[in-house]
Image (tube, rainbow, N blue to C red):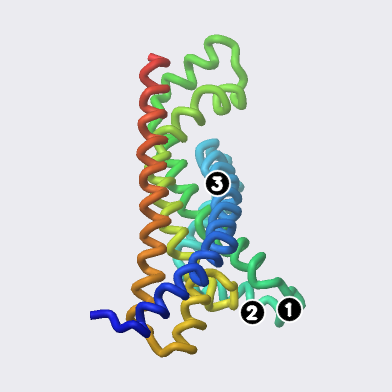
Amino acid sequence: MISERLYGILLDSFWKILLPGLKVTIPLTVIAFSLAMVIAVIMALIQFANVKVLKHIARFYIWVVRGTPLLVQLFIVFYGLPKVGIVLAPFPSAVIVFSVNEGAYGAEIIRAALESVPKGQMEAGYCVGMSYLQIIRRIILPQALRTAFPSLSNSLIAMVKDTSLAANITVAEMFMATQRIVARTYEPLALYCEVGLIYLLFSTILTKLQRVGEKKLDFYGYNRR
């Protein structure tokens, strides 16, 4: 049974945890994921265009980022860069790291989606007099993004949970808020379960939105046929 004291702690802490989630966790996720998608599309298009020098640079970036832990990247940017004179606040540091990290994974998702579009689509575009950029923008990229949508949505949900790592560089998101409450109340099990449920709530909402988005994309694709 939950004691009266513990019940009071959970009730009081709920809003103290949720508000940092709404004010910090969600904005951090939205900003970082938006920048990550820009990076991912650029890196994917570079690889798809098969320009050797640029392709090697893109592959090197993806190799390094995917091969190193996210937590290490956070520490390098926030604690390491000041050693060379580059000092960043916690929130911008987290935005940079999360966007660069997710950009590498997103680039591979979009690259695979681009390569799944039949090559005849390019040839058809050239036949009607379209330029390479027009074909990519109007024909290839829309189809590829529709294919990549489920995987990118899963990446977004994963990023919401990964933002808890930002507490390690003093970003005042909801996991850090929970840690502070635990330090004051000495109730780690109940409070960490509570913050886990809040993360689950955010993830569930995004999952529902993902399904709605997939249905709309399927409907749009069906009507275009």
Q: In the rendered structure, which amino acid carries the disc numbered 2?
A: Gly
The residue pinned by badge 2 equals 80
Q: Nearer the viewer, residue 176 or 132?
A: 176
Q: Classify mark 3: helix, strand or loop.
A: helix
On the image, numbered disc 1 is attached to which residue? Answer: 84
Residue located at (42% from left, 56% from top): 202
Identify whether 206 is placed above or below 133.
below
Q: Is 107 left or right of 42, judged from the image as shown?
A: left
> In the figure, 222 relative to 71: above or below?
above
Quadrant of res 191: bottom left
Residue 192 locus on image (x, y percent): 38, 76
Tell me if 7 is positioned left or right of 143 in this view: left
| As drawn, 155 above or below 19 | above
Identified at 42% across, 73% down, the residue is 11
Residue 80 in the image: x percent, y percent?
64, 79
**Which residue is the site of mark 3?**
37
Q: Residue at x 45, y 52 (%)?
A: 156
Question: Tag 1: residue type?
Answer: Val
Q: Where residue 95 appears, x then y in whole percent?
A: 61, 61
Q: Are marks 1 and 2 in contact (CB under 8 Å)?
A: yes
